[in-house]
Amino acid sequence: MPEVSPMAFLISSAYLLGSIPFGLLLAKLFGGMDVRKVGSGNIGATNVARVVGPLAGTLTLVFDTAKGAAAVWLAGRFTNESATWMMMAAIAVLLGHCFPIWIRFRGGKGVATALGVFLALCPLAAVVALLLFLLCVAYWRFVSLGSIAAAAAMPLLIYFLWAPRHAPPIIVNVGTLAIALLVIYKHDGNLQRLVEGTMTRIAILGGGGWGTALAIVLSRSRMPHEISLWVHNAGLAESIGRDRENKTYLPGSKLPESVRVHPKLETALSGAQVIVGATPSADARAVYVSALPFLVSGASFVSASKGLEPSTHLRMSEVIAQVVSPKFAPRIAVISGPSFAAEAARGEPTAVVLASRDAALAAELQEEFAGPAFRLYTNDDVLGVELAGAMKNVMAIAAGACQGLGLGSNALAALITRGLAEMARLAVALGARPETLSGLAGLGDLVLTCTGSLSRNRFVGIELGKGRLLLEILANMRMVAEGVNTAAPLLALAREHRIEMPITAQVDAILHAGKSPQDAIRDIMERPLKRE
């Protein structure tokens, strides 16, 4: 029997090895962030991959697995393959990972380290457990469920696969059971959500750039979700599902494997508790009407579309209420603010507003959607947030026209400032709060859309300023420029409430009356002089 003190050293060394927080270190190295404060807050490979990236996640998986295998292998080398001491080292390294001394005993869930342990103890059992894990994840799309299933199966796998015609020593059976119970215990929160059905199912309606970006962004959020993306075009849906990339509307951004892509509304909406609408405003009513038979009673809605319904001048929250209210009283929120899809999908810092008259819903969705690079501020001024999101698109067309005409910074600064004043006049007249127009949904989105190279509405304006015809411009665009269909409804609302909107009026004349951008600018500059 080996001496006690060397064995104490061996066990303590295994614990300290397990305590090395590779996920935390790699997240800081690759992402410059404390992974304990983002995503699920876990230092394991899944959270690191979700919030930092696949490379950091893969390396975390490799190193966490390696430390489990190394602890058991070293114990075997020093004790002449003693099953007792190898199992004690296994338990010690796993305890180190789950309760690391270096970071106040708040560690990972032990799945990768347990895999390493069993690769060293019984490779065949570890491989079978890994296959079971992969099958569960492929079918149910929940990593936690695969982890729990593999852990639960491990005691039986060890018992039957330990060695031909030989049962494992009792210490191995007991130790394996202890490890399995520890891994399952560390997944208690996940297990409870699965049993209670509280893992939020989110359906995103719209496979354009913004809908795809939201699927990517929400997959990185702090709260785990089951996300479905509905793509109307079956061919595009098949392509996105196969390549994990929307090459048509959001090229270069990879969609996580956890996001399911569906061409059918019925399957995308199955069991969805939160429905995010990211379709063009002109199509929103038809989509919600088609979705109505498949909605779960009591589902919440988040409109991410920035526009008005052309035929009725209604905001998207009003369209949702009209369509859904006959079936049940919907809880509705809207999301808006300076947020180019490509930048948000790349994980660049993005801040938006989540507005709802239901304060509890706003707070709930704020927690659900928030991620390491996606910050949400709540607001109860739904009208102001929606109007701002619609009006800034029209101003962006005007800003683009200025650039297309070759005008400089003076003109752009004047346009943005007077455009904001125009937006505020209409919004306040309709009941919005002035400060909403000064926030992210107003000024923030206005500045981004009027100056950013990724703005579709600004692009339309630039091409109009260069003398191209609107129909020609739109025919060569894959994505929708909401401002084209929003100018007329906004102008109708302004006239109804006797609000002067000279920039909107001139943009509408350029879009729908064939007026030249040069004449539109001259008419604005020659208006009667007045106080600011």
Image (tube, helix red, strand yellow):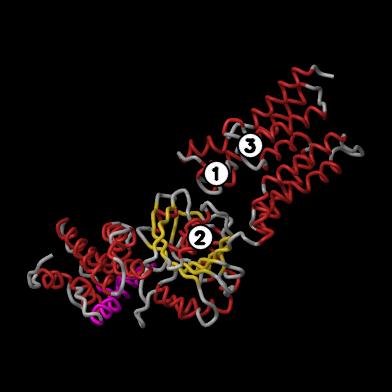
Q: Nearer the viewer, mark 1 or mark 2?
A: 2
Q: What range of the chain is rendered magenta?
A: 469-496
Say whether residue 516 is left or right of residue 164.
left
Magenta region, main secondary structure: helix
Determine which quarter of the picture holds residue 280: bottom left
Say whether residue 73 is magenta: no
The residue under the point 49% across, 71% down is 331
Asked whether the residues under the numbered discs 3 and 2 touch, taking CB atoms below 8 Å apart as contact, a structural biologist would say no
On residue 48, the disc is 1
Closer to the chain start, of discs 1 and 2, is 1
On residue 64, the disc is 3
Residue 14 seen by the camera: yes
Q: In terms of depth relative to the viewer, which is nearer, 431 or 109?
A: 431
Mark 2 falls on what kind of element? helix
Closer to the chain start, of discs 3 and 2, is 3
C-alpha distance separating marks 1 and 2: 24 Å
Give the residue pinned by disc 2. Answer: 364
Q: How many marks?
A: 3
The residue under the point 22% across, 67% down is 398
Determine which quarter of the picture holds residue 85: top right
- The amino acid sitting under disc 2 is Glu
